Amino acid sequence: MNTYQTTHVTGSLYVNRGLVSENLLDWSGYKEISAATLEGKGWTRLTLNSREPLLGEPTESSQGHHYTYLIRQGDRGRFLLVSEHTELVTILLNRLGIASQVRPPEIRINDLVNELAAKPSLYVMSAVYAHIEGYGQALKSIAFYGGDIGETVLFRQLLPQLRPHRVSLRDVTRRAEVLSVGARGEISFTYTNDSNLIDVDDGLRFLSKKGYLNWDGDALSTGA
């Protein structure tokens, strides 16, 4: 992962289970982890170096294996951690010894989808993944893709029967994909260079200001 290669990254938002003011992200004592501050405010790139492959890759590598992460640290013990594979996120949390000390927040995807369908603002929906009710075992889930899903008659007609659990947001002005968010705190986006991390920040700020991020609710315990 570098500033010259487009990469899809995925991971999750996290918050401390205990003291909300405590910063659990401390990699300074780990020789296998190196860090670099990025141009985007609050963003850090970590590289985890391993002699052994962590994802089942071929082991023939004299230089070992290198795994890259992007971290966005916030206040009150909140942070975003993404990499090229979700498994790598879990591996790093375990390596730092904090996997049991953090949890994902609940993201109110249903409210987000319904409100964007009724009144688009800075963003429109380019993808919606949902469970659908009323069709039994014949049809349990459905996905929509398009430039502005909330504008389509079919989607509006089906919306009362949907329980959305993931949505992708597109910037209205630039018509560019920004990020995809899931009900259990999942976040994914396309990383092109450090400057597009600002767009991700704007998207997360939008979710926060609109009240779609429920940091007090544990997504795993609520079954969102």
Image: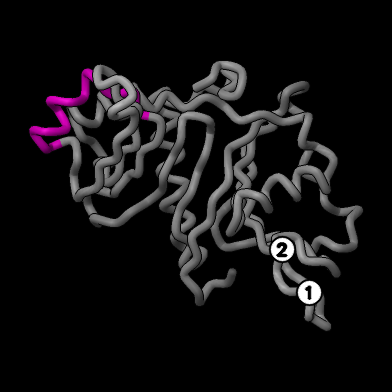
- Give the main secondary structure of the magenta stretch: helix
Q: Amino acid at mark 2?
A: Gly
199 relative position to 134: left or right: right
Residue 56, numbered label:
2
Crowding at mark 2 (Cα within 10 Å: few <14, some 14-19, many 20+): few
Percent across and percent down for residue 64 are 81, 75
* Quadrant housing residue 57: bottom right
How many numbered callouts? 2
Above or below for 210 versus 217: below
Above or below for 204 versus 3: above
Crowding at mark 1 (Cα within 10 Å: few <14, some 14-19, many 20+): few
Percent across and percent down for residue 31 are 90, 62
Specify the farthest residue to the front: 138
- Alpha carbon of mark 1 to alpha carbon of mark 2: how far? 8 Å
Percent across and percent down for residue 186 are 52, 39
Specify the farthest residue to the left: 153
Q: Viewer-proximal residue, 174 or 84?
A: 84
Q: Which residue is mark 1?
A: 59
5 relative position to 13: left or right: left
Q: Amino acid at mark 1?
A: Thr
Above or below for 134 versus 59: above
Image point 86% across, 54% down: which residue?
Answer: 28
User: Magenta stretch containing residue 3, yes or no?
Assistant: no
Image point 42% across, 24% down: which residue?
Answer: 108
102 relative position to 196: left or right: right
User: Magenta stretch containing residue 161, yes or no?
Assistant: yes
Range shown magenta:
151-164
* Quadrant housing residue 37: bottom right
Image point 73% across, 74% down: which residue?
Answer: 58
* Quadrant housing residue 116: top left
Percent across and percent down for residue 52 are 83, 66
